[in-house]
Image (cartoon, coloured by chain):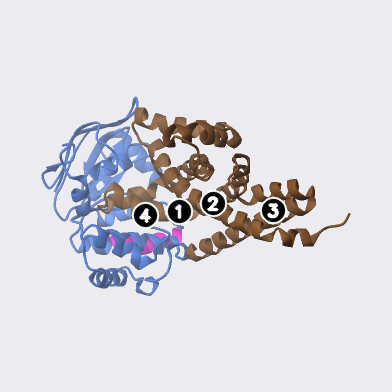
Amino acid sequence: MIKVRNLKKSFGHHEVLKNINVSVQPQEVVVVIGPSGSGKSTFLRCINLLETISDGHVYIEGIDLADKKTDINKVRTEVGMVFQQFNLFPHKTVIENIMLSPMKVRKVAAEQAREKGLALLRKVGLEDKADAYPDSLSGGQKQRVAIARALAMEPKIMLFDEPTSALDPEMVGEVLEVMKQLAKEGMTMVVVTHEMGFAREVGDRVIFMDGGFIVEENVPSELFENPKEERTISFLSKVL
Amino acid sequence: MDFRFDLISEYSSFFLKGTMLTIGLSIASILFGTILGLLIGLGKMMKNNFLAQPFAWYIVFFRGTPFLVQILLIHFAVVPLFLGKTNAIVAAILALSFCSAAYIAEIFRAGIQSIDRGQMEAARSLGMNHLQAMRYVILPQAFKRMIPPLGNEFIVLIKDSSLAALIAAPELMYWGRAMQGQYFRVWEPYLTAAVIYLLLTLSLSFLLTKLERRLATG
C-alpha cells in the first residue's frame, strides 16, 4: 500500500532522512517512535509530499510520488492527515470544515456532504458541535473534528503526526479512543506518536527512528520487551 | 473674530460639488488601487525572484517618493505622454491608485503570510490544489485580518486626494482654496473642508468596523 525506497530528505545541507525503507500493508497500523529531531515527522510528511523528496521513492498504491508527472492532489485525496496542531479552518464551522474538501475536490453535493459529515461527527462523538466554530472547542474535540474532516475524503490511508502532543493530558484518551476504533475498522494507518501505550496496544508494527535512520522495527511486544539495538534500549529506558 | 456662516452657506453649492468629486476620486482610486495592489502583492510573492523583482521595485518607488511629486509627475508628464494633453481628474485617480496600490500590496502580502502555514498544509492534505486552498482557506482568513490596515490606507487615500487641488482637479480642497481667494477668509473655507473630510473618513471607518464585525466568527 505504501512503499518507501531509499528515501532521503535534506533541508539545505542538513540531511534529516538518510535512506529510509519501509513497506506498509493494507489495514496495517504502523507506529513510528523516536526522539525529537529523529526525522519521524519529516518521514510522515514525505508520504503525502508535504515535504518534497530529495532522493529515493515513495509509492502509494504503486504511484510514485517522486515522479514529477504524478498528480499529487489526486494522491492526497486518498491519504488523510491529522496534524499535531489540528489545523482546523477557524473561519468555518465544524461541519463546514468537514464538508469543504468533499464538495470542492470531490464535487459531492452539499446535502450529501452534510449528511456524511454529520455521520462522521457522530462517530467521533461530536454531533452536537456541528455548527460550532473551532475556537469554541477543547483541544481533544478539535483533534476529533480534524480526524472526521480527514475521513470525509474517504482516504485509504491515514497519517497521524503526533496527534496528541498538543493536548492536555486528560484529553489524550478521547483522541486515542477514536484512533483505536479506526484501526479496528481496518484503516491503514501510520502514526507518529510519543504514546507508547497506544503503540503497544494498537500498533501492528513499531518503527524506532533515530538520526534519520530506522534503527529497529518489530511487532510491539518484541520491540518493547526485547529491543536489540543500543539506541532503542536507551530511548525506551527514558520513555517507559 | 467673527465667523461668517453666511459665507459658507453662500458657497455651499461649490463645497457640495467638490465633496462629490472627492468621493468620486476616492471610490475610483480605492477600487483601482485595491485591484492593482492585489496583483502587485501576488507578483511580489512569486517564488521566481527574477519575476518578483519588478513588483518589489514598484513598491519601493511609490512608497519611497512623496505623493506630491508623484501626482505632479503623473499630471504633467505621464498623462500627456499617453493622452496628448493632461486631465486633472484622470491624473488624480491614477496617482492615488498607483500610490495606494504600493501600500495595499504590502497589506495583502502581510495578510496572507500571517496565516499559519498549517492552514495551507491542511487544505493541501485534503486534496485541494493551491488555488482552491488559497480561495477557500487562506484568503478568507487573510482578508479579515487585512480590514483594519486597509481601512487605514483608505483613510489616508481620502485625505491625500486633497493634493489633487494642486493640479486643479475641482475637488473639495480646490473649492476651499478658491473660497479663500475670493473672500480673503481663512477660517471658514478650511474649517468647512476639515469638517467634511472628517465626516468622510468617519463614515468610512464606521462602515469598515461594521464589516469587520459581520465577518467575526466564534
Q: Callout 2, which amino acid?
A: Ser
Q: Position of residue A118 (x, y in %)?
A: 29, 72
A102 or A223: nearer the viewer: A102
Q: Is residue A152 visible?
A: no
Q: Position of residue B125 (x, y in %)?
A: 28, 50
Q: Callout 3, which amino acid?
A: Ala
Q: Is residue B135 visible?
A: yes
Query: Where residue A208 is drawn, which disc sits there?
Result: none
B144 or B208: nearer the viewer: B208
Q: Nearer the viewer, mark 1 or mark 4?
A: 1
Query: What separation in Å lies between label 1 and label 2 (alpha carbons)?
Result: 21 Å
- Image height of B212 relative to A5, above or below: below
Q: Colour of chain A?
A: blue
Residue under pointer 2? B26
Residue under pointer 4? B137
Query: What separation in Å lies between label 2 and label 4 (alpha carbons)?
Result: 30 Å
**As drawn, is B94 to the left or to the right of A130?**
right
Chain letter for brown, please: B
Query: What separation in Å lies between label 2 and label 3 (alpha carbons)?
Result: 15 Å
Label 1 close to label 4 by CB (< 8 Å): no
Q: Callout 4, which amino acid?
A: Val
Query: Where residue B143 is drawn, which disc sits there?
Result: 1
Query: What separation in Å lies between label 1 and label 4 (alpha carbons)?
Result: 11 Å
Label 3 close to label 1 by CB (< 8 Å): no
Q: Secondary structure at mark 3?
A: helix
Q: Secondary structure at mark 1?
A: helix
Provide the residue span drawn in magenta.
Answer: A169-179
Which mark sits nearer the N-terminus, 4 or 3?
A: 4
Q: Secondary structure at mark 2?
A: helix
